[in-house]
Image: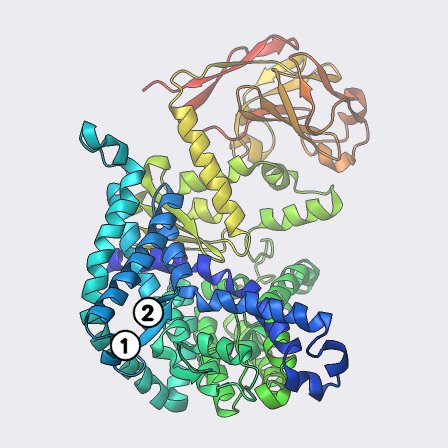
Amino acid sequence: MKDQVFGVLQRIGRSFMLPIALLPVAGLLLGIGGSFSNTTMLETYGLTRIMGPGTFWNALFTVMSQAGDIVFANLPILFAMGIAIGMAKKEKEVAALAAVISFLVMHAAIGAMIAVNGGTDALKEGAGAMVAGIQSLQMGVFGGILVGLGTAWLHNRYYRIELPQVLSFFGGTRFVPIVSALFYVLVGILMYFIWPPVQAAISGVGGFVLRSGYPGTWFYGFMERALIPFGLHHVFYIPFWQTAVGGTMEIGGKIVEGAQNIFFAELADQGNTRFSVEATRFMAGKFPLMIFGLPGAALAMYQAALPEKKKEVSGLLLSAALTSMLTGITEPLEFTFLFTAPLLYGIHCVFAGLAYMLMHMLDVGVGMTFSGGLIDLFLFGILQGNKKTGWLWIVVVGVFYFLMYCAVFLVLIRKLDYKTPGREVGAAAKLYTRSDVEQRKEERKGTGPGQAGREKSAGKTGTRSGEILKGLGGPDNITDVDCCATRLRCTVKDEKKVDESVLKATGASGVIKKGKGVQIIYGPQVSVIKSDLEEYLEKYGDESDEGDSHELIKSPMTGTVIPLSEVPDEAFAGKMMGDGAAVIPDDEYVYAPADGTVTFVFPTKHAIGFQTDGGHEMLIHVGIDTVSLSGDSFEAFVHDGDHVRTGDKLLKADIQEIKDKVPSLASPVLFTDLPDCLEVHILKRGKIRSGEPFLELHNKEK
């Protein structure tokens, strides 16, 4: 039961990310527009003549402010759509449409019940609200969550329903909006009776939280960080930010619920002179933590690194520290010491709670959209002025936090000999894996050692996706794939088939398993990884459904065929790069092994990526460690994107010139992204001439 609850919460948490992702842009518009159209701010800085009422700039900033404010005003319907999309298994666009219809129908039903029972005068003070132009109850984001979850459940249950022949037009995905609308008519009627006492209970919880004072703020900050390893922090903080649990306030004649909503309503209010600290207490603590504290931890890890590895680790830690400071995305740093030094993460959670409590005690009124980084600090602190926000305390406390994190982490890392980046003897310094580091070097320089890791990743989304698929137990073991800001979130049928070591080798900084829920932490690039995996799964399914998938590959070189196991390179011999065979060439030319497209030519011209017209990715790699020659003795006859026919010249390699400069001339010819249903047969061993049948690809026998 615990595992099932975790799985549901995991899916709900990741579904929150779609509407939450809108907030930084909306906050940017509202922050800039609201600030520069505020008459008090313009008078303070002497800008009234340039940007005051009646000027072009005032009109522009007013439009920006209104454009941002409308997003926050309609968060409930955005949450309804976002959660429905996130929770739907297939046909997500239908779920989104059904959610909008359900949301409007539910509130229309509530509005009708209010009218039938005496109108708004019959409601308790603060219970009524205008929602999307409909007189309804003040349900806030809870109403959107209720619609999103219910619609997703109906969608997953009925989107493939088959109706009798006479009604078949209304079957399948068309049935989902219909059944959702009917269902939420009933829900709206029930909510008229059920929601007022629920709202009173929520307000009671909010009152308790507000009365908890500084200890309650510390506990909030502690729990928000402590839940990050489990991926449940979104589920925890959203009620504080978006519902009455985080407070209720009347602003501009309207009742506003939720700490973040209160802050942005105050930001949009021209007459506001000070932001409510009772609201920002749930946000302001992130700033000293993310802009100062975690970069201090990064400096400590750099100082604790072995002398010979400091240069290697500096780029990694600097990148992660800047990511934390600018965007507030902290998991690349947090997961580095979570898995290598759990005690440090526990101390980090305590410090996090303390940061929130200190901001509360010092009356800091800086809110945020999502990150808690420098961008939000500038928009919602510095730009608003210290009198209105007290943002200077963030810098004062932040400097202290930087020094405290640096000192505490450095002492404990050295004293307890934690293997943070740069302290692993004989291993590469890493935040993720060595292949990520080498890929960055390749992108910057185009050449260098470590070619196996780079070639695996260069233009080969299928290679990593295939390994992720393997680590999750194969396509038949996966029931759902999604992601949040930094982690790939999957649901599997059999958790015992999940191989954490395989998943970590794909570049993950950590893997969390809880029942059938699997979270793979990749960092900010996770959305690309998720898209690649979904595309790969679709391609895998297409290839699996084709029946026989024979493809004949001709030898690209004249020479001697050897199995991959005899290639003197661990990555190739272990088939880490793909399956195939190798040729020890006698001739200097490399020819196209089939009709297809050149996907990439390495800058050093020693290797070429190739996709057959049958859709299979290949790699032809001339010699071992030939990347070290920096292109000397190689000539390319094709470019990225060229379509070639079997036997067309691709490369020229001066065999006599390079044979004494590299470990081996053995040249692997590989399929790099084969699904499990396909296998490679070597058709000829020993001597072979270019153009002769070499490899055959077809379905495995069942």
Asked if the residue under mark 2 is in contact with the one under mark 1, i.e. CB atoms within 8 Å, the reply is: yes
Q: Quadrant of residue 549?
A: top left
Q: Quadrant of the C terminus?
A: top left
In this rendered view, identify the residue nearer to me: 512 or 572. 512
Q: Is residue 301 visible?
A: no
Q: Quadrant of residue 454?
A: top right
- Three-letter code for the amino acid on which mark 1 is drawn: Thr
The residue under label 1 is 120
The residue under label 2 is 135
Q: On the picture, is 562 further left or further right than 95?
A: right
Q: Quadrant of the N terminus?
A: bottom left
Which residue corresponds to the image point at 68% horizontal and 73% vertical from the top-left?
Answer: 58
> Helix, strand or loop at disc 2?
strand
Q: On the picture, is 175 further left or further right than 680?
A: left
Q: Residues within 10 Å of mark 2 (few under 14, many from 20)?
A: many
- Three-letter code for the amino acid on which mark 2 is drawn: Gln
Which residue corresponds to the image point at 57% horizontal and 63% vertical from the top-left?
Answer: 25
Q: Position of residue 393 (x, y in %)?
A: 59, 88
What label sits on residue 133 in the rendered view?
none
Q: Position of residue 573 (x, y in %)?
A: 54, 30
